[in-house]
Image (tube, rainbow, N blue to C red):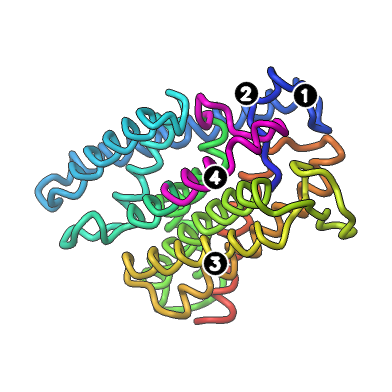
Amino acid sequence: MGEEMPGVARDTGWRKAIPESRDRLQSRVLVIVVGAWLAGLCAYSVFVAYSSVASFTALPVEAVEISLGFALLVRALRAATPGGAVCGGMICFLITLWTGSFTESALRTGLTPLILLFVLTFVSTRAGRTKKARTGLAESRRGRSAAQVIANLSVAALSVSPQSENLVQRWMAYCCVSGLYDAWASEAVKIMCVAALVEATADTVSSEIGQAFGGDPVLIAGLRRVEPGTDGAVTFLGSCAGVAAGASVAIVGATAMHLSAAATLTALGAGICGLFFDSLLGATVERRGWMGNDLVNFTSTAFAAVLAAVIYRFFVL
């Protein structure tokens, strides 16, 4: 929460605890490492679709077309920079392809909650923009950068990759849950994806609504009042808005991907825990200048995804 955009620094001065050079370095490393990982997964996915064309339906082609359209739309609305739009397109492709069924519509995939996430974050970012601009908290008019897109959405895409599903299967084998490897892993990675999307939605909506309409926030560590935009600061209104937005993404995602009620609650609970974990990181390591906002957001979505898998394995199965 309390996210500030790179473009703001040029107008109002650097206001973060972390040195600007360190923050930019962390963001570049995130883009290089995770961006290359996403690109490699996309190339692998295309290869799998091409080599298995006899058994594939139109889903891979639809996933490519939808992802290109998504990237172009994001760019046309200036919701992201060119690099951010490209990263968003890759993420959209991976989520659509690897959460889908070759006998159902592309809307019966993670694409549907991803679209809802985009709508909710787009609207909340522009809500009260004049007020946020006066205080230097408005998003850059260029849109979200590649680093910001990767920080918020890449974990959802990485969660549903074949490599991730294989890792979950190995974990199940290690836990000695015989006979459940394939079925559990297939559902678990979808739950992880939804949890990451819930966290990303709730974080952005809570931050944007809180900054625009929430009044004076309090620091989650210590509950003392601080200035709007402070790392780790939360407002009651913003938090409620974030939880409501996250819940809508969880319900829509679970419905689209045929997840059970228990799986839906697991994804929602893990995502909301990730939301407050994000604030805790902001109030501690980010305020000390150790981590920048992009790395905090990436860590929080990863926390939500892993927590969802753990909860599902030990408390739901």
Q: Give the residue at x 45% y 61%.
A: 249
Amino acid at pointer 3: Ala
Q: Look at the numbered disc 4 and give the secondary structure of its residue.
A: loop
Residue at left offset 38%, top offset 34%: 74
Residue 37 or residue 61, whichever sits in front: 61
User: Is disc 1 placed on a helix, strand or loop?
Assistant: loop
Q: Please state which amino acid type lies under the numbered disc 2.
A: Gly
Identity of the amino acid at label 4?
Answer: Ala
Disc tally is 4
Q: CA distance from mark 2 to mark 1?
A: 10 Å
Marks 1 and 3, the one that precedes in the sequence: 1
**Pointer 2: residues within 10 angstroms few (<14), some, or many (20+)?**
some
Disc marking residue 127: 4
Q: Which residues are magenta?
A: 119-145
- What residue is pinned by disc 2? 7
Judge whether residue 169 can be spotted in this image. no
| Mark 4 vs 2: CB contact within 8 A | no
- Going from N to C along the chain, the mark reached first, 2 or 3, is 2
Give the mark nearer the N terminus: 1 vs 4: 1
Determine whether, in the image, residue 76 is placed left or right of residue 284.
left
- Mark 2 and mark 1 lie on one chain; the one further toward the N terminus is 2
Instruction: Residue 309: give its label.
Output: 3
